[in-house]
Image: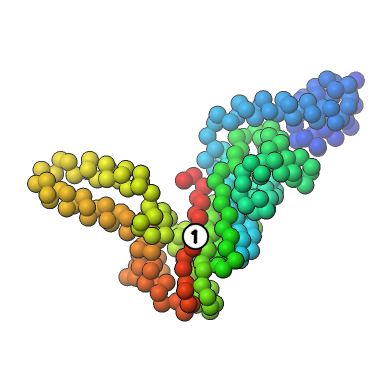
């Protein structure tokens, strides 16, 4: 006969349901540690079934300092779970670990959390407890001793946990008040404009080739001479490159200017946009 106090302790330790805890304790002959192990093994099976489902909700977490900052995406199935305290606590802790391992996913999964279990095991336990597919998505660490990191969170849920996050690295020789303002505004611009690269030449070739195919399909039924179609096509591709490259995008704060125009006006010697990462849940 398993006493209720043991079941209660097991539920508090694992978050599993009453029947699962009672069954595990019977199988473990009342041994609490063995029962936890049994539930974890069962949890792997339960979690595996959930992993075939879609996880398009969740949040991103940003942490670090002005020299090194990381961003990580944690996905779940519903917005309700994305606001769950257990999910938020888990996301924040693995976000801190992620910054310490420089977004190395293998190191992250094998790192131990405060409770002594690895990130991978805690993820399985959380899936079992909450009942939804939960995955660790995109992540990146920006680090440069010569640069300063700027961040922006949009649709904040709690602390630095949000639905959209941007981390931006600027390099310069001399700091000033307007570089602080520019850094914050540029991070907001990136959030709103979603550039693919810093410069036109850095857009991936496969993206350009795919866009060319789309433009070709759009223009094939125009009934215009081939040279006219080619000219229109070239114009559309160039516009696509300009619209998706950070330096040539219209500045969100003043669309009459390009980002590169604003950058050139900032009072900071050798100012360069070194890198950026933008992660939005659902994209």
Left of 241 or right of it: where is 89? right
Q: Position of residue 20 (x, y in %)?
A: 76, 25
Residue in the image at 22% along x and 52% along y: 234
Say if 104 sits above or below 245 in the image: above
Q: 114 and 280: which one is in front?
A: 114
| Residue shown at 24% from the left, 45% from the top | 215
Which residue occupies the foreground of this view, 133 or 172?
A: 172
Tell me if residue 230 comes above or below residue 20 in the rendering: below
Q: Is residue 221 left or right of residue 272?
A: left
Colour scheme of this structure image? rainbow
- Residue closer to the observer: 234 or 205: 205
Instruction: Specify whether residue 82 is in view.
Output: no
Evaluate whether residue 108 shows in this view.
yes
Say which residue label 1 marks: 275
Q: Position of residue 214 (x, y in %)?
A: 27, 43
- Tell me the residue at 69%/46% (across/down): 90
Q: Is residue 252 left or right of residue 140?
A: left
Looking at the image, residue 96 lies above or below residue 118: below
Total marks shown come to 1
Choose top left, top right, bottom left or bottom right for residue 257. Answer: bottom left
Q: Position of residue 1 (x, y in %)?
A: 90, 20
- Label 1 sits on a secondary structure element that is strand
* 118 relative position to 162: left or right: right
Label 1 environment density (alpha carbons within 10 Å; few <14, some 14–19, many ≥20): some
Image coordinates for residue 103, horizontal then vertical, percent: 61, 49
């Amino acid at each position: 006969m398993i006493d209720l106090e043991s079941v209660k302790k097991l539920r508090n330790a694992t978050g599993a349901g009453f029947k699962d805890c009672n069954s595990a304790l019977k199988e473990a002959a009342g041994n609490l540690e063995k029962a936890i192990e049994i539930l974890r093994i069962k949890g792997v099976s339960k979690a595996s079934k959930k992993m075939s489902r879609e996880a398009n909700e969740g949040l991103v977490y940003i942490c670090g300092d002005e020299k090194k900052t990381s961003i990580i995406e944690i996905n779940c199935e519903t917005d309700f779970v994305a606001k769950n305290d257990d999910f938020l606590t888990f996301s924040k802790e693995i976000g801190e670990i992620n910054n310490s391992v420089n977004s190395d996913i293998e190191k992250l999964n094998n790192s131990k959390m405060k409770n002594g279990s690895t990130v991978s095991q805690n993820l399985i336990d959380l899936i079992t407890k909450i009942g939804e597919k939960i995955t660790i998505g995109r992540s990146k660490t920006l680090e440069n001793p010569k640069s300063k990191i700027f961040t922006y969170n949009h649709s904040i849920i709690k602390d630095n946990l949000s639905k959209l996050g941007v981390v931006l690295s600027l390099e310069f020789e001399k700091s000033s008040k307007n570089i602080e303002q520019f850094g914050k505004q540029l991070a907001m611009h990136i959030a709103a404009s979603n550039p693919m690269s810093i410069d036109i030449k850095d857009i991936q070739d496969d993206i350009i080739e795919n866009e060319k195919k789309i433009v070709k399909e759009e223009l094939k039924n125009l009934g215009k001479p081939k040279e006219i179609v080619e000219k229109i096509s070239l114009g559309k591709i160039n516009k696509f490159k300009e619209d998706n490259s950070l330096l040539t995008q219209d500045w969100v704060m003043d669309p009459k200017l390009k980002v590169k125009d604003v950058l050139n006006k900032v009072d900071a010697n050798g100012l360069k946009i070194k890198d950026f990462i933008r992660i939005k849940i659902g994209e």
